[in-house]
Image: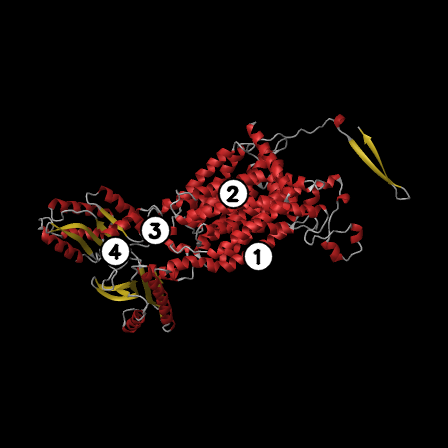
């Protein structure tokens, strides 16, 4: 009873709001436009986020704490007289991989001369101070363990000074000239292939997605505008509403512009992940406007415009308000400090702002636009040209093309029985009511739909069991870029070995003590479980450290022993940090570096290695940490990425439970929960089968998928569950007839706007397109196939209306029309009881 009272109270409130907006349409139409223009002027302060680590690395990362500790123990000497590398910090650098198209030996005389010429050209660059750090060989064939026969690729690395902001600016310019130099050298030497890469390449290629997407987004916008106008058009020139399709898109655009202006004024910075926000706005905003237009078609034409607008608000705004609240809650949780990935948090925050203003503008701007078109319709003016449509007798004297453009049905030509069918000439309305509703509820069609759903669940489960967390940063950049080309070459020729991993012992221990040596040896035995460290363990066992060396000789022994490490352990460096204390040398901290041999799944191996070593550091008697600059991105990435989705799902379930007291029947929320679970399960499964990993972009799309499903399915379920006195099949048809047109219109516009995104040469937009396309497709499948079939034979039950078969209670009316010679119409009604 309480739910019914709240439901009626909210409908009454929205009805009064609609009547108030219809009484002041000029104000509510102009205010959003002025606000958007004023805030849109802030684009003069437009800024781009430069730091990729700030956006994509987990904020609360143990690797960042470990990096600070490493930098405090072993500060990097970046002077021009010292060599340093990215073993501890990436800094500024330039790299180039040189290989041959014919897999030739890069160590022969011809290729060696080319490499030396390139090296000379690079070292002649005058901007900044470069440090050449040697070379690496890839695709190596060996004669023996210590002799190289040939190499298919060579990588040269140059590190730059970046001590202060001035050095950093000069180094950035040097990196740009470095790439230009390599590309110029490539043009004059076609027999070799060069892949340049700098510390700025990832950031530039990440932001390049926005530039390469502009043309495709413009094409999508034109297609959406065209289809939105067509979806709202009818042959009846008075009741056709093409301007409302265009104004619906304008409403979404004004809200997005307002949100962007607020972001700029508050110091927010743009990044390429924002490309998904317009599609979120398109899916939610257009459906809201089309639902209002669908409600307008159900109102009586003989009512005043204010009364019709009030009826539209009472009919559609309650559902639109609840779905908007769902968007704000789910994305609001993603925008909270609980989100560990900054790019996801900023995206969710900006989406909340845009959705909030979209809701206000749909109420105000689009509501007032509906009022203006209502007056045009009541005055029998043309829906496009706003010209008064002449009466049928006047049109008979006009040419055929003129009559076609001004075709309209007048109220005096419509009987009471035809009044409710005024809008049935709309193509989508006719298709649903006359064909599709009867077909989908046919007894012979239902088994095939159920079978198809079982197939859908099977494939979704198969994909769900293969979900991968994607932490590869190349998945977020444009495709035809230096980052992709360099990463491909690096994985091809240099993926047999992992990045250099540093082991840092950060306590003062007595290395010369026999018991401490046994502890260190015991600690190294823990690596036996990891095949990468077997050669290291075997080597340590050969060391004669059990006799207890003098303290003053131990430092030299430790340094010299690690320099003689076996080939496959590759301990390139061991540094002892020492200090003077009472005229004695005391070891404060030490470090050593390892390059481990890896397989094809290098990133998964590294993640497992990182977790294993950290667990070992908690139980070991020796205090140590492991670090590599790439650990900052991969550290806790899986839990960091999945957290926004998990929190949003929990918040969605909570809101569905809470809103059960606001809707007329709590069973609506039960069905919504089941539908959302089915859609999300399918999207995750098919997303994996389509080779999309669970990364920052896909998780944001899945959060949106929760809301998109509720947007489209909630009105259908509400109409069906609240229906009484007819069969289930009858109410399924009625729900599709009432809300199916709005779902179809928004879906078609959404898909048309999304398709050009598939052609954008970027991995980020590829993930965005595949996820959003699957969300739209699976939701559409549930709205028009799964739910209409399942609801015909599952609860809630319906009461079938009893037909009155008693002939005594039946009236039979026969109408006879007689026309006399003077064309005077006389109707004689003969009633038989």
Q: Nearer the viewer, mark 2 or mark 1?
A: 1
- The tag earlier along the polypeptide, 3 or 4, is 4
Q: Which mark is residue 640?
A: none
Task: Determine which residue is flagged by label 4.
Answer: 595
**Badge 3 is on which residue?**
633
Q: Position of residue 234 (x, y in %)?
A: 67, 50
Location of mark 2 (residue) = 709
Distance in Å between CA atoms under marks 4 and 1: 53 Å
Q: In this rendering, would 128 be left or right of 558? A: right
Work out whether mark 2 precedes mark 1 in sequence or the reverse, and give the earlier one. Answer: 1
| Mark 2 neighbour class, 10 Å CA radius: few under 14, some 14 to 19, many 20 or more | many
- Local crowd at mark 4 within 10 Å, few (<14), some, or many (≥20)? some
Residue 129, image x, y percentages: 29, 66
Mark 2–mark 3 CB contact (< 8 Å): no
Please state if 508 lies on the left or on the right of 357 as rendered: left
Residues at circles 3 and 4 in contact by the CB criterion of under 8 Å:
no
- Residue at 60 percent of width and 31 percent of height: 798
Tell me how many marks there are.
4
């Amino acid at each position: 009873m309480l739910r019914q009272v709240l439901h009626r109270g909210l409908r009454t409130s929205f009805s009064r709001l609609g009547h108030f907006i219809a009484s002041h349409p000029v104000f509510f139409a102009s205010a959003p436009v002025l606000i958007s223009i004023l805030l849109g002027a802030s684009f003069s302060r437009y800024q781009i986020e430069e730091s990729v680590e700030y956006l994509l690395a987990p904020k609360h990362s143990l690797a960042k704490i470990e990096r600070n500790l490493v930098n405090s123990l072993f500060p990097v000497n970046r002077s021009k007289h010292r060599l340093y590398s990215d073993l501890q910090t990436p800094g500024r650098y330039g790299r180039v991989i040189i290989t041959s198209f014919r897999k030739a030996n890069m160590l022969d005389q011809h290729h060696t001369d080319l490499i030396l010429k390139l090296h000379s050209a690079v070292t002649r660059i005058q901007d900044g101070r470069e440090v050449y750090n040697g070379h690496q060989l890839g695709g190596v064939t060996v004669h023996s363990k210590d002799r190289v026969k040939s190499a298919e690729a060579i990588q040269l690395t140059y590190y730059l000074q970046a001590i202060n902001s001035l050095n950093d600016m000069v180094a950035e310019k040097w990196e740009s000239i470095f790439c230009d130099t390599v590309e110029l050298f490539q043009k004059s030497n076609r027999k070799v292939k060069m892949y340049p890469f700098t510390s700025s390449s990832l950031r530039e290629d990440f932001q390049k997605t926005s530039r390469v997407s502009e043309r495709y987004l413009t094409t999508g916008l034109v297609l959406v505008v065209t289809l939105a106008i067509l979806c709202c058009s009818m042959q009846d020139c008075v009741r056709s509403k093409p301007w409302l399709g265009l104004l619906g898109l304008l409403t979404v655009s004004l809200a997005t512009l307002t949100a962007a202006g607020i972001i700029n004024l508050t110091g927010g910075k743009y990044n390429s992940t924002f490309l998904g926000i317009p599609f979120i706005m398109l899916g939610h905003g257009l459906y809201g406007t089309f639902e209002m237009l669908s409600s307008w078609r159900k109102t009586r034409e003989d009512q005043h415009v204010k009364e019709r607008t009030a009826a539209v608000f009472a009919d559609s705004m309650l559902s639109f308000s609840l779905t908007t609240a769902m968007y704000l809650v789910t994305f609001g949780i993603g925008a909270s400090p609980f989100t560990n990935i900054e790019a996801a948090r900023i995206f969710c925050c900006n989406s909340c702002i845009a959705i909030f203003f979209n809701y206000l503008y749909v109420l105000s701007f689009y509501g007032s636009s509906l009022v203006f078109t209502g007056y045009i319709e009541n005055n029998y003016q043309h829906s496009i040209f706003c010209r008064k449509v002449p009466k049928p007798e006047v049109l008979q004297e006009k040419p055929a093309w003129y009559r076609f453009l001004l075709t309209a049905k007048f109220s005096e030509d419509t009987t009471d029985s035809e009044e409710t069918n005024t809008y049935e000439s709309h193509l989508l309305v006719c298709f649903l009511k006359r064909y599709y509703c009867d077909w989908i509820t046919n007894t012979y069609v239902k088994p095939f739909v159920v079978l198809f759903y079982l197939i859908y669940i099977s494939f979704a489960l198969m994909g769900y069991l293969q979900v991968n967390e994607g932490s590869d940063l190349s998945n977020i950049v444009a495709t035809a870029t230096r980052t992709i080309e360099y990463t491909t070459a690096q994985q091809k020729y240099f993926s047999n070995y992992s990045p250099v991993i540093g082991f840092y012992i950060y306590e003062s221990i007595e290395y010369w003590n026999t018991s401490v040596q046994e502890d260190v040896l015991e600690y190294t035995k823990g690596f036996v479980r990891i095949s990468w460290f077997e050669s290291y363990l075997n080597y340590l066992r050969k060391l004669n450290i059990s006799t207890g060396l003098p303290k003053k000789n131990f430092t030299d022994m430790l340094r010299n022993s690690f320099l003689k490490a076996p080939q496959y352990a590759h301990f390139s460096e061991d540094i002892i940090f020492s200090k003077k204390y009472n005229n004695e040398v005391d070891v404060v901290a030490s470090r050593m570096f390892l390059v481990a041999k890896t397989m094809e799944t290098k990133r998964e191996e590294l993640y497992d290695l990182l977790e294993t070593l950290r667990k070992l550091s908690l139980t070991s008697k020796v205090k140590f940490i492991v670090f590599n600059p790439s650990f900052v991105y991969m550290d806790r990435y899986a839990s960091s990425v999945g957290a926004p989705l998990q929190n949003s799902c929990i918040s969605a379930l909570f809101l569905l439970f809470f809103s059960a007291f606001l809707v007329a029947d709590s069973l609506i929320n039960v069905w919504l929960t089941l539908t959302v679970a089915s859609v999300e399960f399918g999207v995750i499964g098919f997303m994996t089968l389509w080779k999309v990993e669970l990364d920052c972009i896909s998780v944001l799309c899945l959060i949106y998928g929760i809301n998109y499903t509720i947007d489209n399915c909630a009105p259908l379920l509400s109409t069906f569950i609240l229906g009484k006195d007819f069969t289930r099949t009858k109410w399924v048809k009625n729900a599709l007839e009432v809300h199916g047109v709005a779902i179809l219109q928004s879906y078609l516009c959404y898909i048309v706007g999304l398709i050009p995104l598939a052609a954008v040469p970027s991995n980020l937009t590829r993930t965005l397109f595949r996820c959003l396309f699957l969300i739209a497709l699976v939701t559409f499948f549930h709205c028009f196939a799964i739910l209409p079939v399942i609801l015909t034979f599952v609860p809630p039950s319906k009461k079938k209306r009893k037909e009155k078969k008693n002939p005594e209670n039946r009236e039979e009316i026969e109408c006879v029309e007689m026309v006399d010679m003077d064309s005077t119409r006389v109707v004689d009604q003969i009633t038989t009881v």
